[in-house]
Image (cartoon, rainbow, N blue to C red):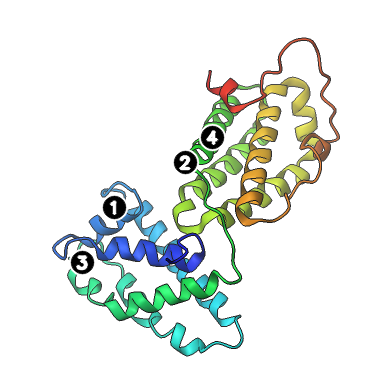
Amino acid sequence: MIDLDNPAGRFYNLLQQAKSRPDSHKVREVWAHVFDEDQKDDSAITRKVVEFYQLGEEVKQLISMNNGVNKELYLSSFPQVERAIFPLNLNTTWQGQKQQLNDGVMTRLQFCSELLSTFYKEEKLSIDELKSITTLIDNLFEAVLSGSLEESIRLTLLEEIERLRTALSMYKIKGAKGLKQSLQSTIGMVVANKTDLSKASEKDKDTIERLGLLIDKIDSFTAKALKVHKVLSKPFQSLLGLVFQEDSTKSPVTEVDDIEA
C-alpha cells in the first residue's frame, strides 16, 4: 500500500483522481473536481494547477537527493505527467491529456511514493483539525475587521490571514509543509511588527489573543504532522513581550469551542 501523505503520494493520488474523470469532460471540469473549486473560477483553478505542478517539481527534487537509486528510472514518467498538466487549456476536452497518464506512468509514480516513504514522514491532519484552523482563521478575520486596531496593522494582519487561508486551501496539494511555511511568514510578521502589536493589545486584547491562538494551533498541528519540533518554544505572548494578567473571569479566547459558541 502506497503512502498517500508524502509529496509523491499526494501527487499520485491527485493524478489518479484526474485520470478517473471521463474523457469527454472539459479540462476545467477535471481540475475543478480534483481541487474542489468552482468550474467558473478560472483563476482559482489555474492557481491550484500551478501549485500542483510545483508539487511534481518537489517530488523530482526529493528523488534526486536520494543516492543509491536509479533516479532516471524513477523520474522517467515526469515528462508525460507534465504533458498531462500543461499546456493548460481549460476549454479543451480531457481525453488528449489524459492519454499521457497510462498505467506505466502511474505505476512508476507509486514507486516514487514508496521510495519517499523510507525517509519522508508526514501524518495527515484530521478533518476536525483542519476545521478548527478554518474556524480560528474566520473568527480572527472578523475580529480584525470589527476591532479597534490602527489601519496599518489591520491591513498587515488581514494580509497574513489571507496568506494562511490560502495555505489551508492548498493543503490537499502541499500538505502540512505549506501550512508551516505560511506560519513562519506570519511569525516573521509578528516579530517585524512587535511594537505595533504590543500597543494594539492594549486596545484590542481579544484580537491579539485570537492571533496567538491561531499561531499556536497551526504550530502544534504542523509539528505533529511533520514530526518536528514546534516553531515557537515559548508562548506567543513572549514574542511581543506581553504578560496577560489572569483574572477571575473567563478569557475571551481559550479554546476553539469557545469561539464557535
- 125 or 77: nearer the viewer: 125
Q: Is residue 127 left or right of residue 179?
A: left
Circle 1 Cα neighbour tier, 10 Å, few/some/many (<14 / 14–19 / ≥20): some
Vertical arrangement, residue 98 with respect to residue 170, above or below? below
Residue 33 numbered mark, or none: 1
Residue found at x 79% / y 28%:
199
Task: Report how far apart the C-alphas of labels 1 and 4 lie in the structure.
Answer: 24 Å
Can you say whether 206 is above or below 216 in the image? above
Instruction: Determine contact: label 2, label 1, CB under 8 Å.
Output: no
Say which label, 1 or 3, has the lower sequence index. Answer: 1
Structural distance between the alpha carbons of marks 3 and 4: 36 Å
- Secondary structure found at label 1: helix
**Residue lying at 47% horizontally and 71% vertically, measured from the top left:** 113
- Estimate the x, y position of residue 147 in percent, counting from the top left: 62, 22
Give 240 or 113, whichever is nearer the viewer. 113
Amino acid type at circle 2 is Ile
